[in-house]
Image: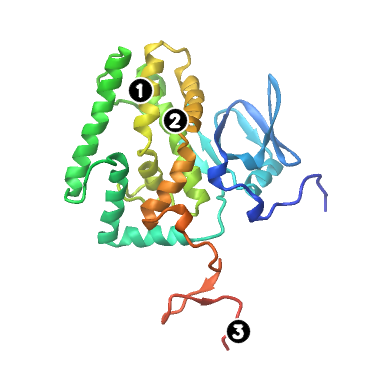
C-alpha cells in the first residue's frame, strides 16, 4: 500500500467549532491540492496555502480541479465544500459536514412534522426580522405580507439612496448575463449567503432540506436561514456596487460579501439563531454531555449503547 506524507487525522474535539471559523473561500480556474494540513491553491499567479481548519466553506467555481488527497483533508477538517456554476449562481453539490451529534437534527425533524411546533418555529424566524414587535397574534398569511413589505421597502430605500433605477427582482438562473447590474449583484451575493448557511447547517448536523418557511426543496432550510440576513448584507451591497458601474460586479460582490459577513458576524449569528429557532434556547444552554450514541427504546426515550441486553 502506498504511504503518503501528511498529518494525523484530528479528533473532532480538536477542530475549531464552526462559529470560530472565518466565512468562506470562493475559488475558480485553479488546482486544489494538499500540503500536509493546508489546502494548496495553485493558479497562474502562484501558490497560496490555506489552513484547512480555519474556513467553514469552499465554493468551487468553473475551471477548478481538486485532488483526492485534498478532499480527504477537507473532509477530515469538517469544511463544507460546495460546487457552484458559472459566476457562482448555480448550486451543484456539496460535501460532508462537521458533526457527531443529532440533537439539532432531531429537534428540526420534530418541529417540521408537528403543525403546532412548525408554526412556532416560523414565528421565531419572523421575530428575528422584527425584534421590537409582538407577532404572537398574527397569522402566517399576515407574517408573509409583513415580510414582503419589509423586503420591498429595502429595495426602494437602497435604490433611492444610491440613485439606481429599480424595477423588480428579475433573473434567469440559466442566463446570468441577461440581468441588469443590480440583479447580477443580488444573485452573486445570495449564492455567498446560501453557501455559508449551507455550511453552518451541515456543520451543526441539521438537514438542508427540512425547511419551515420554504418547503419541498433540497435546500429549503438553507433559504430559511439565509433570508434572515439578506436585508443587512446582500441588498445594500448590490445597490452600492451597481451605482458605481462596477466592472465584473459578480466577483466584486463576492469579495465584498465576504468582508460584510465577517463585519456583521453572520457565521456566529447563524449558529446562535439556529439553536434559538429549533430549540428555543441559546447555544450555551444546550446540553453537550449526553452520550453521542444511544439505543431507541419504545418504553423510554433511550437506553445506553454498548450494553448487552440479552
Q: Secondary structure at mark 3?
A: loop
Residue, x 56% and y 43% (percent of image)?
20
Q: Is residue 294 left or right of residue 145?
A: right
Q: In this figure, what is the number of numbered marks?
A: 3
Residue, x 35% and y 26% (percent of image)?
235
Alpha carbons under labels 1 and 3: distance apart: 61 Å
Query: As rendered, which of 257 and 75 lies closer to the eye?
Result: 257
Crowding at dot 1, Cα within 10 Å, few <14 / some 14-19 / many 20+, comes out as many
Q: Nearer the viewer, mark 1 or mark 3?
A: 3
Is any atom of residue 210 visible in this view?
A: no
The disc label shown at residue 308, or none: 3
Crowding at dot 3, Cα within 10 Å, few <14 / some 14-19 / many 20+, comes out as few
Residue 128 spot, x, y in % from top left: 32, 43
Residue, x 57% and y 75% (percent of image)?
305
Residue 231 spot, x, y in % from top left: 34, 31
In this rendering, the answer to whether 233 lies above or below 35 is above
Q: Secondary structure at mark 1?
A: helix
Mark 2 and mark 3 lie on one chain; the one further toward the N terminus is 2
Q: Secondary structure at mark 2?
A: loop
Alpha carbons under labels 2 and 1: distance apart: 11 Å
Q: Quadrant of residue 108?
A: bottom left
Residue, x 61% and y 25% (percent of image)?
29
Q: Is residue 296 left or right of residue 33?
A: left
Mark 1 and mark 3 lie on one chain; the one further toward the N terminus is 1
Q: Which residue is mark 1?
A: 183
The disc label shown at residue 89, or none: 2
In this rendering, the answer to whether 260 lies above or below 222 is above
Amino acid at each position: 500500500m502506498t504511504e503518503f506524507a501528511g498529518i494525523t487525522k484530528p479528533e473532532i474535539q480538536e477542530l475549531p467549532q464552526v462559529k470560530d471559523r472565518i466565512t468562506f473561500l470562493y475559488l475558480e480556474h485553479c488546482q486544489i491540492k494538499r500540503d500536509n494540513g493546508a489546502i494548496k491553491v495553485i493558479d497562474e499567479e502562484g501558490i497560496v496555502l490555506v489552513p484547512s481548519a480555519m474556513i467553514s466553506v469552499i465554493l468551487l467555481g468553473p475551471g477548478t480541479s481538486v485532488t483526492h488527497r485534498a478532499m480527504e483533508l477537507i473532509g477530515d477538517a469538517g469544511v463544507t465544500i460546495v460546487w457552484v456554476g458559472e459566476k457562482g449562481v448555480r448550486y451543484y453539490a456539496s460535501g460532508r459536514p462537521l458533526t457527531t451529534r443529532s440533537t439539532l437534527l432531531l429537534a428540526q425533524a420534530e418541529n417540521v412534522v408537528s403543525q403546532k411546533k412548525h408554526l412556532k418555529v416560523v414565528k421565531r424566524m419572523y421575530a428575528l426580522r422584527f425584534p421590537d414587535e409582538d407577532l404572537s397574534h398574527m397569522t402566517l398569511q399576515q407574517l408573509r405580507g409583513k415580510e414582503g413589505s419589509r423586503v420591498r421597502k429595502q429595495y426602494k430605500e437602497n435604490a433611492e439612496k444610491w440613485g439606481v433605477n429599480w424595477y423588480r427582482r428579475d433573473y434567469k438562473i440559466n442566463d446570468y448575463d441577461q440581468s441588469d447590474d443590480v440583479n447580477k449583484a443580488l444573485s452573486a451575493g445570495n449564492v455567498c449567503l446560501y453557501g455559508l448557511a449551507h455550511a453552518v447547517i451541515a456543520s451543526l448536523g441539521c438537514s438542508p432540506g427540512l425547511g419551515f418557511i420554504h418547503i419541498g426543496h433540497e435546500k429549503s432550510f438553507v433559504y430559511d436561514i439565509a433570508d434572515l440576513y439578506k436585508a443587512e448584507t446582500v441588498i445594500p451591497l448590490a445597490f452600492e456596487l451597481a451605482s458605481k458601474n462596477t466592472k465584473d460586479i459578480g466577483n466584486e460582490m463576492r469579495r465584498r460579501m465576504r468582508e460584510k459577513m465577517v463585519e456583521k458576524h453572520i457565521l456566529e449569528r447563524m449558529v446562535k439563531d439556529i439553536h434559538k429557532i429549533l430549540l428555543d434556547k441559546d447555544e450555551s444552554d444546550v446540553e453537550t454531555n449526553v452520550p453521542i450514541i444511544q439505543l431507541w427504546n419504545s418504553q423510554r426515550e433511550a437506553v445506553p449503547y454498548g450494553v448487552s441486553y440479552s
